[in-house]
Image (tube, helix red, strand yellow):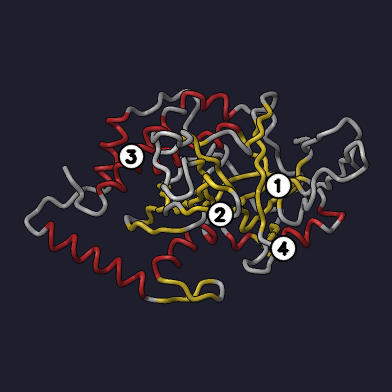
Amino acid sequence: MSYGAPFDDYYRRLIMAAAAASGQEQEHSRETNFYWWPQPQQHHAPSASGLGSGQAPPSYEAIVKAYLEKYPPNNGEDTGRRRDEDVNEHEASKRRMVQWRGNYVSETEAKALRHVFDDMKDHFGHNLPDPDVCAVLKGLSHLGGGRDTIWEGELDFIYNIGGERCRLAYVGMEICLDLTPKLVQNERGRPMLRDYGKSWVYAYLPEITMLKVKQYIRAGTGWEISEEGIFQDPNCNLVAIEAMMHDGTQQPKPSFSVVEDYDATDFRNSSSFTRIGSVQTVYQDTDQQQIHRGIGFFCLSVEIDGSSSTVRPVRGAKGVDDEATLIFTLISFSTWGITDSIAPIVFNTPPYY
């Protein structure tokens, strides 16, 4: 049974991602009982909506069958005509321009932006359903600048929105953002963490959530993801990542939004939040120098150590690293409260407050 070019490969990767992710449901009871994952101080956290801890993981055949029932292929006599009409309409929607938050974007991109940023759907999070998305590698380019064998590639995410495949450069993840000041000094009295809160910050998330992100990327790109830049805390089942931030010169600084109504019970769309500035601006406010829980929106890219600066790396080729390094760039963050249930990263024994 075929969906027809050019979408066969997309569906294959999407089903692979779903099958890979379902293998982790056996650990769901451990995920739902994490004692460390904080509850915001101002109000209750959103309700969970995942599978029960006692349910068995679905089989691969069940995943494929369910997906085919939801999105059946066209096997009638007019399959070719319908496919051509769908492709033509999709291409036309990519050319039509509409406004989204004051910017003109294609109709298809606006649909994906509203889905991810406005409706806050299909993001990775604690005790949330698996997102209906597929990660793809746009391509690899050599970085230059003396890094002779390092190649970089950006990731795109294809969201299935009402049966339409919408491509976007952003993905959402439920995280805790660390805006506590980093004043750790080395033996010479110089700061060890330069530009913290200006060009990068720490973000914390459950280990099982990071594992799921890596599975999706592996299924979509074929590359294994290394542990470089991912710091594990096995005592709390947490990982910390270094989230890069734009400084506003070429790309806008990441925005910081807070929830408006602390008595609300659902914070799953952007109408619940108000933008108060950039992450860099909020970091300078001493009242906000805490750990905030919410949803972070990222651009993701990978770095791969190839064999030379002229030969594009191919996985499995001689001299090419088997793993890719994942790079996170924070674009926007929406918080529904602060937490004191997570201890910030400390590098030395002296306190830094």
- The circle drawn on residue 144 is 2
Q: Secondary structure at mark 4?
A: strand
Residue under pointer 3: 15
Q: Inspect the image, locate mark 2, and give the three-letter code of the amino acid beneath it.
A: Gly
Q: Nearer the viewer, residue 8 or 261?
A: 8
Cα gap from disc 4 to disc 2, whole angstroms: 31 Å
Residue at figure coordinates x 65%, y 41% from the top left:
241
Task: Say whether residue 318 is left or right of residue 212.
Answer: left
Q: Nearer the viewer, mark 3 or mark 2?
A: 2
Residue under pointer 4: 278
Q: Residues within 10 Å of mark 1 (few under 14, many from 20)?
A: many
Q: Inspect the image, locate mark 3, and give the three-letter code of the amino acid beneath it.
A: Ile
Q: Inspect the image, locate mark 4, and give the three-letter code of the amino acid beneath it.
A: Ser
Cα gap from disc 3 to disc 4, whole angstroms: 37 Å
First-in-chain label (2 vs 1)? 2
Task: Say whether residue 257 is left or right of residue 122.
Answer: right
Q: Secondary structure at mark 2?
A: strand
Task: Say whether residue 326 is left or right of residue 3.
Answer: right
Residue at figure coordinates x 55%, y 41% from the top left:
325
